[in-house]
Amino acid sequence: MRRAILFGTFALALSGCASMAPERAQPEIAAQLPNTFPNSENMGEYRPDAWWTAFDDPVLNALVEDALADNLDIAEAAARVAQAAAQARVARSALFPGINASGDASYSNTPLSGSAFGGLAGAGGGGPTRIENDSYSLGLGASYEVDLFGRARSDFAAARADAIAAEYDYRSVQLAAAAETIATYFEIVDGRRQIELTLETLDLLAERTVQTQERFRRGLTPSFELYQVQQDERNTQASLPQAEAALDDAQGRLALLVREYPQTMEERLDRQLLPRLVFDEVPAGLPADLLGQRPDVAAAWARLEAARLRVGARRAERFPAITLTAAPGTQGGEIGSVLDVANNWAINLAAGLTAPIFQGGRISANIEAARATYDQQVANYARTVLTAYREANSAIEEYEENRQRYALILAQREDAQFSAELQARRFEAGVGDYVSYLDALRAVYQVEAALSSAGRAVALSRLDVHRALGGDWAAGVEPNPVGLIPAPQEGQEP
């Protein structure tokens, strides 16, 4: 027993001094991340939390809050976080001894050998002819594999890194759900405005057709002009069902994002939607901040760490494994004697060593597979960093271009409105015709439609900037659980 204890103590002393994992390192391209975004002049501190409230729209704020709490993709991602955390605890269990309880009871009643013929019976044939025996035992069994070369520690650290990656994936899903909600909302706002302008244009074109028909009848306009006006009216009419279908689809997608049915979403949006456009430049901070702000970059780094640690775990499998076991307990022929631990105790201590000699190349193949996975994650992390920088830089530039475009179309609207007012005054003064006024008014509607689309582009490009820069948009928001009800019994209608 002393030898087993000494052997186990020596193994335990060595168990914390070995790690077979490669040294922690980051790809060279990630270390060379530029110091600035060339398309941004505002390098102030980036503040991502609830940035969409700058649109000053209570309907939008409520929708984003509902999406963060009720979105089903977020609920699924939260379950994956819980799963990864549980798997990490499973891996951690290998660092502790395993203890099991055991209990045995046996009873036997057998004839004494030869008693059937009286050969071994007592004097005068009155001796015992059967043997009765019972026994009981209680015990504990404990075993512990000494992690001499760090296999269990590396596997646990890798599983913990996987859990961290799952947490960052969860944040990515939160960001995606909020972003999709905002984008779909502005799609609905623009879609409604486009339909409204289309209806106004149809009224205008109907009146324009009547005026052209009258002028054609009087010989003041050629047939081609009448044909062109009629075609414009028909084309505008044909575009209306498509616009209405697109609006209905957007409302359905928005309902899915907040875990509702489309009918409920129609009721929530049955009001005037007036988000305020924001044109302020977004402080982008430093490119290096992307490594901590963007959850996809952080998740890629965590998976890189997990792959690195698993290389060490697989390498450790080439070396001997030391197992310590202990089995204390008590036994006796009667239950009372079993409970008399002081007089009936027993203990068995053992230490064993197993070393792989021939595994048919399994261990080497596992090491090569782990190393290949590590190389994949190195490339994935480098690509994720490059993508993050490109997306942030492009989003900043696109936001600036869309702001400039909106300003130009806004100036066009002023010109178009001035032209329409001028034609109205000319018509009222008798020096202009009504058709020219209708054409000028139609130009106003066309510019209004372009301005609505440009406003949506400004809002979405601002969204893209925030999404590219990352950050924790929903700090402290917990997803609501998905409700369950009993499933219908077999043969019942669902």
Image: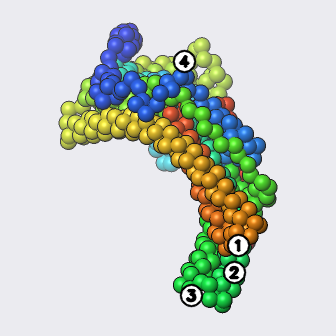
Query: Whole-Å distance between the Cαs marked 4 and 2?
Result: 112 Å
Q: In the structure shown, which secondary structural element does the residue marked by tag 1 occupy?
A: helix
- Position in image of residue 474 (x %, y %): 64, 35
Q: In the structure shown, which secondary structural element does the residue marked by tag 2 occupy?
A: helix
- Position in image of residue 369 (x %, y %): 27, 40
Other residues around mark 4 within 10 Å, as few (<14) / some (14–19) / many (≥20): some
Query: Whole-Å distance between the Cαs marked 3 and 4?
Result: 115 Å
> Which residue: 38% across, 14% down?
16
Q: Amino acid at mark 4?
A: Trp
- Position in image of residue 320 (x %, y %): 28, 25
Other residues around mark 3 within 10 Å, as few (<14) / some (14–19) / many (≥20): some
Mark before the other along the chain sequence, 1 or 3: 3
Residue annotated with mark 4:
345
Q: Which mark is residue 434?
A: 1
User: The N terminus is located in which quarter?
Assistant: top left
Q: Which mark is residue 223?
A: 3
Q: Amino acid at mark 3?
A: Ser
- Contact between marks 2 and 1 (CB within 8 A): the answer is yes
Mark before the other along the chain sequence, 3 or 4: 3
- Contact between marks 1 and 3 (CB within 8 A): the answer is no
- Contact between marks 3 and 4 (CB within 8 A): the answer is no
Instruction: Give the image's coloring scheme.
Output: rainbow
Q: Amino acid at mark 2?
A: Gln
Residue annotated with mark 2:
211
Query: Whole-Å distance between the Cαs marked 3 and 2?
Result: 13 Å
> Which residue: 67% across, 55% down?
418
Mark before the other along the chain sequence, 2 or 1: 2
